[in-house]
Image: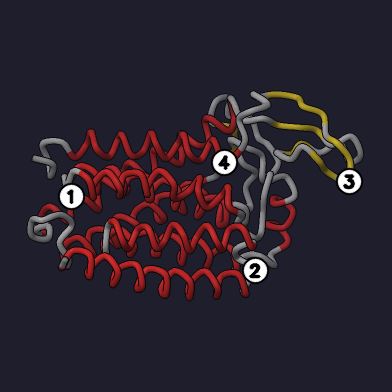
Amino acid sequence: MEWLSEWWVRLAVGLAGSGAVSGFAYRRAALSGSGAWSAVAMGTAFVVLGGPVWFGTLLAFFISSTFWSKWKRRHRAKQSAEARYAKSGRRDAAQVWANGGLGLLLCAGNAIWPDLGWLVAFTGVMAAVNADTWATEIGALSRRAPRVLLSGARVPAGTSGGVTPLGSAAALGGAAFIGAAAALLAAAAPITAAAPLSGQAATALAAIAAVAGLAGAFADSLLGASGQAMFRCRICGSETERAEHCGAQTEHIRGYAWMNNDLVNLMSSAFAGLLAWGLGVGLIIP
């Protein structure tokens, strides 16, 4: 019955820790009500199924992305860009699961069938969502107009698929941050029944996460430019990701109507996770 006792301890710790973090984020307007409850459920599941490496990496993403969002929230350039986004400000349940749901599936896979490959893929996934978030939050402050990856044409700040040098540098920083966090945690605590990662393997994990995360951020931009649904406001004439703007229904002008920002995030992070796994095979994955 020792395993049952440990399970209850993990459940209690997960609920307490996730509840405290989510409650703070809700009070700071970083999460909506649905987002807060989803974060509690997700965080608790990470603690129960994965332990400190998995939950710690998730926490590194959440804290760093929330920091940049709150710090830049009052900047006029960012406010102007956010008017085009499908969602801004508080993260709701859909955003929480789009950013962390795939990672949770990988965590569950590791709990059922322990293998280093799950963690490598997970690190790539979280590096991608963090890279995208940092690029969005920091890149919106760029003094240069974004360019579309597919054509190189200049577009207004906040346009899906637009990239800037500042945003790209921020994406690399966000991916590297998650890689470093995961590497430090994996070097300090066991990730499976085996011992913690060696210093060389941890360094390789950090590098893989940086590469895969940056690639995932660019994949997000490509999907945003080519497939994500975009609309035009019938009132002010601006392009937006929102189906409603200025209090009126918008006009669908390009992309697939079913491909919203949350789905784009999920698809690009899945690509990053697969890339990370592929880079890790033979390098740190036996």
Marks 2/3 in contact by CB < 8 Å: the verdict is no
Q: Is residue 218 visible?
A: yes
Whole-angstrom CA distance, mark 2 to mark 3, is: 23 Å
Q: Residue at x 16, y 66 (%)?
A: 1
Mark 1 sits on what residue?
Answer: 204
Disc 1 on helix, strand or loop? helix
Q: Is residue 183 left or right of residue 131?
A: left
Query: Compared with residue 73, is residue 119 higher up or lower down, i.e. above or below?
Result: above
Whole-angstrom CA distance, mark 4 to mark 2, is: 20 Å
Q: Residue at x 32, y 63 (%)?
A: 47
- Along the line of sight, which residue is nearer the eye, 6 or 185? 6
Q: Residues within 10 Å of mark 3 (few under 14, many from 20)?
A: few
Mark 3 sits on what residue?
Answer: 247
- Along the line of sight, which residue is nearer the eye, 211 or 274? 274
Residue 93 percent across, percent down from the top left: 58, 52
Amino acid marked by disc 1: Ala
- Along the line of sight, which residue is nearer the eye, 39 or 277? 39
Amino acid marked by disc 3: Gly
Q: Is residue 173 left or right of residue 202?
A: right
